[in-house]
Amino acid sequence: MDFWTDKKVLVTGGASFIGSHLTDRLVNLGAKARVADDLSSGALENLHESIDRIEFLQGDLRDRDFTRRAMEDIEVVFHLAACHGGRGFIDTHPADCASNMVLDGIVFDEAMKAKVDRVCFASSACVYPTQLQVKPTNGNMVYLKEEWANPFEQGCAFSDGEYGWAKLMGEMSLKAYNKQYGLKSVSCRLFTVYGERENETHAVIALIAKAFVKMDPYEIWGDGQQDRNFTYVGDIADGMIRAAEKITDGSAINIGTAEHVKIIDSAKMIFEESGFNPTSINFDTSKPVGVFSRAADLTRTRSVLDWEPQTSFKEGLRKTMKWYYENKDVADVAPRLGILLTER
């Protein structure tokens, strides 16, 4: 029997961008899925493919009683619920991001008490020390290795803002439950996810939205030379499922690509795909941009999971743009774009 057939699975934050894709995949693999979400940023519409085949619970996971109900009879927990967004959100909502430490602690504790078999935690590349993600010298690109982020190793704990610190503390907490109680678990460090159902606070959707409303001058936050390893959401979901199957010792694993893509180059690809070419580009260096360079080392991912992302940025971008252009209205997006870029 396949690992997921009839497996009772809880996806926290399962109505969110990533969570809904993960839920769809689990259902298609035969899992009996329950989603717990407060719909603060997620939407039931995101679950349109699987809503008739899942159990949905609406509530706040910071409420222990709600979390306890959500854990009943569950075997595997995918914990994605969090207060988060793109760079525009996390730099302007530090207290909201820090509150994730409370949320994570309750979820892990109730999972242990409910005697679930295992927990898969959606961590982030933001756990990595920011000094490792500066402008490359002499063209030497850095690929982030799992052992470089560790709260117990000197020089390995300097996370990216309150959001990154909260994720690193989440990893530490989950590992502690593994040490003390034997709770099987894994922390998946997700890298710069993009795809259908994502909101405009994230870089790729923000760039697509600006082309969609034909912004001219076209605005790019920063000087455009920053790079990211944009990872398609379908690959992220597949990687998390594989990690939940293979890793049980509470350790962390990179789920992302090893492909550095400059922001300016991603914008040019969007221009080419959309047919919109602005007369000029305004590089706004006053806006938050995060670290300069970020991409994953996949040595452990390939070795332990026998897996790596399969979707090229060009292919994933085309799918994402098709979804955005088919599901959005210029008359709705254009007047609200300033708010959409910074609010969940």
Image: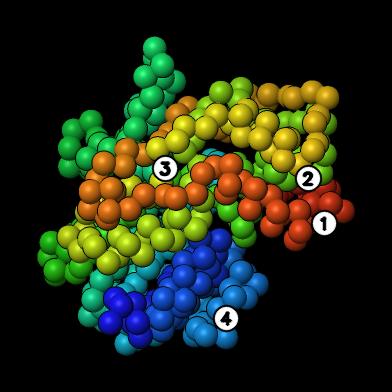
Q: Where is residue 185 in the image (x, y as percent from the top left)?
A: 24, 64
Closer to the N terminus: mark 3 or mark 4? 4
Which residue occupies the foreground of this view, 136 or 132? 136
Mark 3 or mark 2, whichever is nearer to me: 3
Residue 56 x, y percent position in the rendering: 52, 82
Query: Of discs 3 and 1, which sits in the foreground?
Result: 3
Answer few, some or many: residues within 10 Å of disc 4's Cα (few below 14, many 20 plus, some between 14 and 19): many
Residue 96 in the image: above or below residue 209: below
Question: Residue 224 — which label?
Answer: none
Label 1, residues with CA under 10 Å away: few <14, some 14-19, many ≥20 = few
Disc assigned to residue 329: 1
Labels 3 & 2 near each other (Cβ < 8 A): no
Q: Is residue 135 left or right of residue 302?
A: right
Residue 338 visible here: no
Is any part of residue 81 visible from this angle? Answer: yes
The residue type indicated by label 3 comes to Thr
Residue type, label 1: Asp
Gap between marks 3 and 2 measured at Cα: 26 Å
Give the amino acid at mark 4: Ile
Q: Mark 4 points at which residue?
A: 51
